Image (cartoon, rainbow, N blue to C red):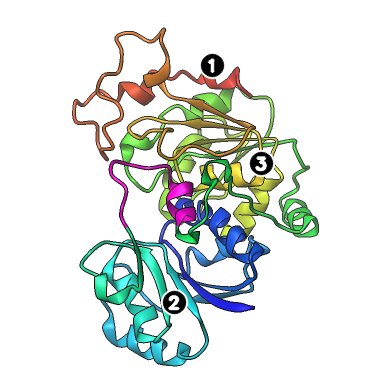
Amino acid sequence: MSRSLVIAPQWIGDAVMTEPLLRRLRARGERLTVGALPWVAPVYRAMPQVDEVIEFPFRHGGLQFKARRTLGKELQGRFDTAYVLPNSLKSALLPFLASIPRRVGYLGEARVGLLTHRLKNPGDKPPMVAFYSALSGESGLEQDRPQLTLPPAQVDEVLRAQGLARGAYVVMAPGAEFGPAKRWPHFGGLAALLDRPVVLLGSAKEAGLCEEIRAQAPERCRNLAGQTSLLEAFALIAGAGHVVSNDSGLMHVAAAFGVPQVALFGSSSPLHTPPLSERAQVVWLKQDPLYMPPLDCAPCFQRECPLGHFRCLKDVSPQRVKALL
């Protein structure tokens, strides 16, 4: 069995979308070790095809050459192939320093000499699952859908600790790391319309946002933002009856667990990063022929609305989303 090191992306949603690639590699007999930053590493612990997860001691920003050189020496001789999923120079540096013979990745950031097998970067914004899966060198990528798995006993343990029953509550993930142009402003209004418990999930940075939502339906909402590990959040998503989210990492997590979900898109596009699940429903006013005037500005892919109106999300009513649950 060949030994492969996979250099993971740094965002949760992107990490989820690498799962089909890893499934392909494992199916053809590669033993997989994933190297990931600590906040992304738990995603790979929900992928049974991954044999080992190494948490990188790196931070956001900076080359951190000394730390990469030290880890590279420790990894020398362990791997036959490295798959470099991010496009940055620093992500390709570690496999080079570890002297891994075969190093596969996309061209980018002047890293030609660091990779032995280089793919051309596609133009525009390609579907991300196919973008990652193409590193396998195989065809038929259009059918790939990410899948995450947790042992049922692990899910049940988390639900028991929270006093929740499978399928009897709604998870809301109101945050989006990218910025306000991806955050639907009516989660609180939706919570007030529901007759089921609502669990609010997000990072510690999103605890204040979730508290504002909880205050609009305090008898129904539980704010767990920043109070769970990522794997505990995964368990809460896996056990939910529905998930409502923006275009975010947790949206892709819900899709990979196959949970019924409503995904709200504003400044971004479901043509680029859709929730890949038959149980997902996407709301994007850009695609609504009855919405007037048409959103000619979407998708703008901006953090803030360049026109200042945020129509793409503000005009999606809580009643419209409730009808999908």
Which residue type carries mark 2?
Answer: Phe
Name the spot of residue 144 as percent of width and height, x first: 57, 46
Examine the rendering and report whether any part of residue 212 can be seen: yes
**Numbered range of the magenta stretch:** 120-134
Name the spot of residue 25 as percent of width and height, x first: 58, 64
Answer left or right for 142 relative to 157: left
**Quadrant where the image shows the C terminus:** top right
In the displayed structure, would residue 147 be above or below residue 118? above
Answer with the quarter of the image where residue 242 lies: top right
Which residue type carries mark 3?
Answer: Gly
| Label 1 element class | helix
- Residue at 57% over, 48% down: 253
| Label 2 element class | loop
Work out how far the residue at label 3 is from the one at label 1, CA to CA, in angstroms: 24 Å
Which residue type carries mark 1?
Answer: Gln
| Mark 3 or mark 2: whose residue is earlier in sequence | 2
Residue tagged by mark 3? Answer: 258
In the displayed structure, would residue 226 be above or below residue 255? below
Answer left or right for 13 relative to 42: left
Work out how far the residue at label 2 is from the one at label 1, CA to CA, in angstroms: 44 Å
Answer with the quarter of the image where residue 184 lies: top left
| Mark 3 or mark 1: whose residue is earlier in sequence | 3
- Residue at 37% over, 62% down: 86
Residue tagged by mark 2? Answer: 56
